[in-house]
Amino acid sequence: MADFWLISVPLDKTTSASVEKLKRAITKTQLCSNWKFSIPDLKVRFLPHISQGYFSSCYFVILPAVWCWICVVPLHFCHCCTRVLKPLLKLVFFSVNMMKYVTKFQWDTAKYPPALPLSSLVDIIGKEVLQVETEFKSRASAYYSLKANLEHKLNNSGYLTTLLVVVNRYLQWERSYESLSQFVVPGSSRKLFEDGEGGIFSVTLFKRVECEFKAKEIFVRWLMVNFSQLFIAWIHLKAIGVFVESVLRYGLPVNYQALLLQTDKKHSKKLRDTLSSLFKHLDPTDSLKYVSCDIPGLCQEEYSSYICFPINTSML
C-alpha cells in the first residue's frame, strides 16, 4: 500500500491559489491522489499551554506507543495464522478498512469530544493504549500457555468432534479456519444457516485440540478488533498533531486546510519538490532541511515550509 502524507497550509489568498495549482499539477502528472482531511476546531486557550508542560510531554510519549502496538498486533496475528498470512493481511484481517477510513476520515466526537482540552484528548487515547497493552499481555499469556501445554500431549486419538462457529465474514472464515489448528480436517467446514447478519458454520477437528482451536479463534478475534481501535486512535493523534502545529506555525485564530495525499516511492521525490516549490513563500527557512522544533517529537523530522505528517502503512 502506498503511504499517505497529511499536510497543512494556511488559508490565505496566496496559499489558496497554490493549493489550486497543486490540484491541477496532481491531475496533470498523476503524482498522487488527494482528499480534504477534516479536523474540528479543538480547544486552545493559550499557545504556551501547547508548547510547554503536560500536553507536549504526553503527546510524544503516547504517539510512538500507539505505533508500537499497531505493529505488534499484526505480528501476533501472523503467528496464529501463518498458513494464510498474505491473503488474510491483504484482504480480511483489519476490521477497519484502513484506506477507506483515512480517506473518509471523520472525527469521532463521541469518543474524543472536541470541547475537551488537548491534554484530555491525549489522555483518553493514552488510557486506550494502556488498556489494550494490559489486556493483550493477559490474553497472549493465557493463549500461549495453553498452546504450550497442548503441544506436549501426543495426539493418538482418532476421535473427531464438530464445532459450530458463528461467522459474519464468510470469505475470512473460509480462508482462515484451517490455519487455526494443524489438526482441523481440511475442507470440513459447512454452512448450516445464514441470515442478514451472518451464518453458522460447522468445522471438524480432533478432540484433543478443541481447546486450542477455541482459544486461538478468540485471541485472533480480539487482535482484529483491537488493531482497529488502535488504528483509529493513531489517526486521531496524527490529526491532533497537525492541528497543534498549524496553530503554532500559522497562529490564531485557527485558519488552515489539511489535505491527505497518497503517493508511492516512484513519485514521492517529485511530489515533495512540487510541494516545496508551491509553498516556499510560507517560510524562507525551507532551504534548511533540518531545523529545531518548539515541541521536540511533535513536528516532522524533515522540516519544510508546509506542515507534513507521514502516515506509514508499510505494515501491510
Image: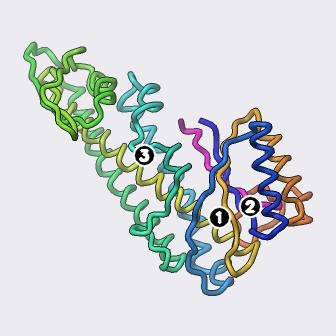
Estimate the x, y position of residue 14 in percent, counting from the top left.
85, 65
Q: Is residue 26 above or below residue 88?
A: below
Which residue in the structure is indicated by mark 3?
96
The answer to which quarter of the image holds residue 208 is top left
Badge 3 vs badge 2, beta-carbon distance below 8 Å: no
Estimate the x, y position of residue 28 in percent, counting from the top left.
79, 38
Mark 2 residue type: Ile
**Sequence-earlier tag: 3 or 2:** 3
Classify residue 104 as left or right of residue 271: left
The answer to which quarter of the image holds residue 193 is top left
Q: Which sits in the foreground, 168 or 151?
A: 168
Q: Which sits in the foreground, 78 or 100?
A: 100
Which residue in the structure is indicated by mark 1?
242
Furthest residue in direction bottom, as rendered = 46
Mark 1 residue type: Val
Badge 2 vs badge 1, beta-carbon distance below 8 Å: yes
Q: Which sits in the foreground, 132 or 13?
A: 13
Query: Going 82% across and 60% down the picture, which residue do you hit?
Result: 17
Badge 3 vs badge 1, beta-carbon distance below 8 Å: no
Provide the residue span drawn in magenta.
Answer: 305-316
Which residue in the structure is indicated by mark 2?
307
Q: Few, some or many C-alpha atoms within 10 Å of disc 1 (few <14, some 14-19, many ≥20)?
A: many
Estimate the x, y position of residue 305 in percent, counting from the top left.
83, 61
Q: CA distance from mark 3 to mark 1?
A: 22 Å
Q: Is residue 205 above or below residue 294?
A: above
Q: How many marks?
A: 3
User: Magenta stretch: residue 150 in it?
Assistant: no
**Sequence-earlier tag: 2 or 1:** 1
Q: CA distance from mark 3 to mark 2?
A: 27 Å
Q: Is residue 230 above or below residue 72?
A: below
Residue 296's label in the rendered image is none
